[in-house]
Amino acid sequence: MPEKSFHPRNKHKNGYDFESLTKTNPHLNSFLFENSNGHTSIDFSDPEAVKTLNKTLLQKHYGIPNWEIPKGYLMPPIPSRVDYLHHMADLFDGEKNIRCLDIGVGANCIYPMVGHQEYGWQFVGSDIEKKSLEAAQKNLDAHPFLKNAIELRQQSNANHIFNGIVKEGETFDCSICNPPFHSSEEAARKGTLRKANNLNTSNALNFGGQHHELWCQGGELLFLKNTIRESQYFKKQVTWFTSLVSKKENIRPLKVVLKKAKATRFKTIPMEHGNKISRILLWSYQ
């Protein structure tokens, strides 16, 4: 993980200090090995290894010692998730009195938990799936200091993003989103196989992710087009709307939709983490 790829405030910009991490969680030792480059690492295709690494990172760097995630759910890469939050913090010049909406908070609840610990922000996390919210709530219940900082809400209508979640009269400084990237279950399966090939493993089944986490009809592009269109009706309640965009070719059609929606400001922030290249799309009506 080269330093230039990560935000300057990212605690993981220089890679993983496994010697230090194993002092925090000795159990991590059982997953370490020396890779072909002669560096200590873990098998990133092994969900138990990645889960143990995540638990250790959250405990050591963010004061979250009891994080859990159900088997089969999307395993978040902590460094890139944190990077998103650092870029959002730049919008507000370090202001701590920030209220953020996490669309698709997931069972892992990473953005709200880390966002509060790193910056003191308040969060509302929404999700379409009840089981994801139940798992996220267990993480919150295991850390009482997060009780008054993070609220979870279920989206009952799959056709809506903000409607049914943002209450009348309430405001948010920003919204964040890690959208389902794929357009079908088959596309998600192929994406998982590519990911496995990139890691030189045949163990493709080890990459977690539920249906709503990985794919939706129309994929990332249609999801974000709908997000932009619906955002028009909440332009006075959310200062900055943002989302990750995995495919560079989606930016141009999304900018067309933003112009039609009469967004007054929009921009992209590139993010490059190892082999993964992504970007954040931001827009505002204020």
Image (spheres, rainbow, N blue to C red):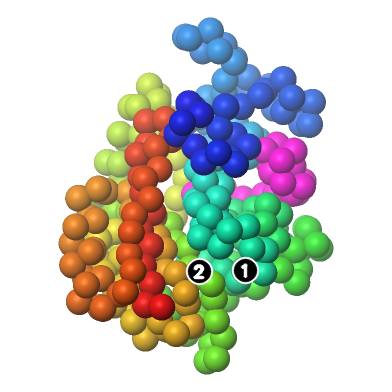
Type of residue at label 2? Cys
Q: Is residue 71 left or right of residue 155?
A: right
Check residue 63 for magenta coloring. yes
Total marks shown come to 2
Is the residue 15 above or below the residue 165 in the image? Answer: above
Q: Residue at x 33, y 27 (%)?
A: 197
Q: Is residue 68 left or right of residue 42?
A: right
Q: Residue at x 42, y 69 (%)?
A: 241
Where residue 98 is drawn, which disc sits there? 1
Crowd band around label 2 with a 10 angstrom C-alpha radius: few (<14), some (14–19), many (20+): many
Q: Residue at x 62, y 68 (%)?
A: 98
Residue segment shown in magenta: 55-76
Helix, strand or loop at label 1? It is loop
Image location of residue 85, percent across then percent down: 54, 53
Q: CA distance from mark 2 to mark 1?
A: 8 Å
CB under 8 Å between callouts 2 and 1?
yes
- Image-quadrant location for residue 112: bottom right
Mark 2 vs 1, N-terminal side: 1
- Image-quadrant location for residue 41: top right
Image location of residue 130, percent across then percent down: 55, 70
Is the residue 22 above or below the residue 260 in the image? Answer: above
Type of residue at label 1? Ile
Check residue 256 for magenta coloring. no
Closest to the observer: 52 or 279? 279
Helix, strand or loop at label 2? It is strand
- Image-quadrant location for residue 219: bottom left
Where residue 173 is drawn, which disc sits there? none
Residue 34 appears in view: yes
Q: Is residue 263 left or right of residue 257?
A: right
Where residue 174 is drawn, which disc sits there? 2
